[in-house]
Amino acid sequence: MSRITNLLFLVVCTLLTPALGCDINVAGYSRFSETLENSTIIGLLFVNDNEVYTSRCFSLNQTCEDERLLYSHNSTLTDLDVYYEGCTIFITDISGGIHVIDIKASPITVEHLSSQWQVAELSVDWLSPLLYVLTQTQQLYKCDMMLRNCLHLHDEYLTYTPRAIAADAFNGYLYWITDTGMLIKHDMAKEISGSMQNIDVAIRANVSTYSVAYDCYDLYSIYNYDVAYREITLTYLDGENVRTHLPLEHTPGDIYTELNCIHDTHCLWLETNNNSTLLHWSLQESGQLLSIENLNISAKSLLTLWNRQAQPLPVPTTYPDFTEYYSDSTGIRMHWDKPDIVGHYLLKQQVLARWSGLLSKDSKYMQSEAAWSAWNYELNITSDEYFQSITNLTDLSLYIGDLQPSTNYSVSILAYTETDRGPMRTVTCRTLSSDPLIYTSTTSHLRAIDAFGDLKQTWNVSSFSWVICEMIRRDESLLYMIVSPRLSVGCIDKSTTTLVLLDISSKTAIVSEEVTAISAVGYDWIGKMVYMASSDTQALFRADAYAESLNENMEKLASLNLVIKHLSIDSVNGRIYWTPTRDNNLYSFDMGPADSYEVSAALYDGLPYRRLNGPVVDMTSNKVHWAMTSLLTTILYSRDLIDNTQTSVESSIDMSGQPFIASDDKFYVILNSSLRTLDVKLKTNYNSLGTNVIAFLYYSPSFHPRLEGKPDS
């Protein structure tokens, strides 16, 4: 027999609430669970060869009655399980097919589920809901209820043969028996080990059949002590010790299958001896052992129980934890993780009272992913003069806008369901200043000025052995810079340049030794990666911008056989714009894995006898800019990052070879070692913002609309 059992629920005598889910007529029965004169009624579904039958067993009459044919298949059936909420019965046949019997239809309908495997057994995780499938080649899969999406649960070949799989939906475990009688308990959230190592063993050996009683979170098994002795053993799923439940009147040759139990009062199983199979029913409250002979049952019959599967009421017991936030001058984007999955519990009083009336107040941890589906998040943001509460959130991130610049905000989050609210997590976040800063470098100083040229801060860098040739800003205090030795010919010769990470607050510098002769650098502030081009190796590299060392996690993306002169990164759309030294063309890459960076057709073919300067990505206007300069005129081109439309403006200002930055309606450019601002039409030459400038960096929240930060508790 391919499958021992997959117990759903056995209904006991007292029902405090009406039936849930599929309370319909099944083969003439209005419901399988009810109370008649204090008699426990158990609804049965069983298979004999190719036919599915229904019956009801009464403890008062000590018999099972009204056997009725529910469905007749065209080949021998090998397994069945019930999904009560969906009013469906899943069956497998000897050819490896899976079929779904829809009992809410009138007449009953049967649908074949298309599968790429031959299925031996299945088990329904009715809580998620998911199907666990064991193929005839001993492969285990987790699938949706229609087998459209499946996940292979083990990469390694299993060194044993699993059988009798059963999903414990409440506790998040999948059980099966090995060919040596070992009972395996597998955490559904983990990958299955191919060998017998690193697996959780519930019972070490000698198990012939078992069942999971969800109502009391117990595991029952028929244990083979020796040739002459068998007993039903109870193992508490909450970690308590194993104890003997019921000795069996065993005789050699008895074969036990299809065990089904409910807490401490009832167990049903099939016992075969000398080609005779009986349904045994143990009533522990009366000490009786019934043998049911009037059912159409054989040694190969399958047995399960028709019963309600009430959805649990998960209660959040931990808070969702913030992982990071991004801020600009007027808003904050928060990201958070789900609470720890073992931090949710079921109240027995809430769940079991629906069909058994038990009033136990014990709680039970859950691991099923279905618990998430009923959860929402509430986020509150406050300051001295501001409060906003946002509820019914289902995503794991949210942008809160219309905030004040340079302001601290308290942000709180909790998870809640219809029944309860979890604890709250509160962090402090700060919006950025709306005022831009411009960093300029000379041979002796690094300065920060505002848009009007007023000095905000200055750092003496004359003690360093190099001068700053190009800068990008990582965060509040760290700059990535291309530097050149002071004794060289300066920033014109890129063969001696290197990359430095400078902490401007402590004036400590980290020098990269992995890549030399840096010709261009760019920063992806969303991916948190720094890109650099080397004129020595003519290659493009990438490194983790937040690594402790610049040499850590350095990755060579491509050998280009050319030198990149300028590059600029569009983090939002995931593109790198760049120009080489060999021509006046503009190119781009899509950000991706190594070896995906290949030189393709140019986005713009440069004009002869002119010099291309740029490109510069401006996230404020969602455009990339570059300049083409001849002896008499300069043409500034702008290309929309979204629709790729292109415009141009002509000017008499010489921008050949001079770094420039675009922001809002201004362009910043170095002219004759003086940093100046120009209007968008390149017509007006504003006052100088600094002299003897070698390199500059325009930094504004509008340029970097989200800066990473770790929330402060």
Image (cartoon, rainbow, N blue to C red):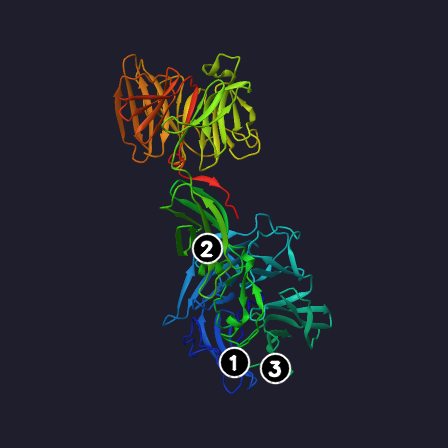
Q: Are marks 1 and 2 in contact (CB under 8 Å)?
A: no
- As displayed, is residue 550 above or below residue 302? above
Q: Earlier in the sequence, mark 2 or mark 3?
A: 2
Q: Residue at x 33, y 21 (%)?
A: 687
Q: Return the x and y of residue 688 as percentages of the image width and height.
A: 36, 20
Nearer to the camera, 162 or 570: 570
Residue at numbered disc 3: 290
Q: Residues within 10 Å of mark 1 (few under 14, many from 20)?
A: some
Identify which amino acid the numbered label 1 is placed on.
Answer: Thr
Q: Earlier in the sequence, mark 1 or mark 2?
A: 1
Tag in front: 2 or 3: 3
Helix, strand or loop status at disc 2: loop
Nearer to the camera, 114 or 569: 569
Nearer to the camera, 699 or 272: 699
Q: Is residue 539 left or right of residue 249?
A: left
Residue at numbered disc 2: 115
Q: Is residue 185 left or right of residue 489?
A: right
Identify which amino acid the numbered label 3 is placed on.
Answer: Leu
- As displayed, is residue 246 above or below residue 152? below
Residue 520 seen in this snapshot: no
Q: Are marks 2 and 3 in contact (CB under 8 Å)?
A: no
Identify which amino acid the numbered label 2 is placed on.
Answer: Ser
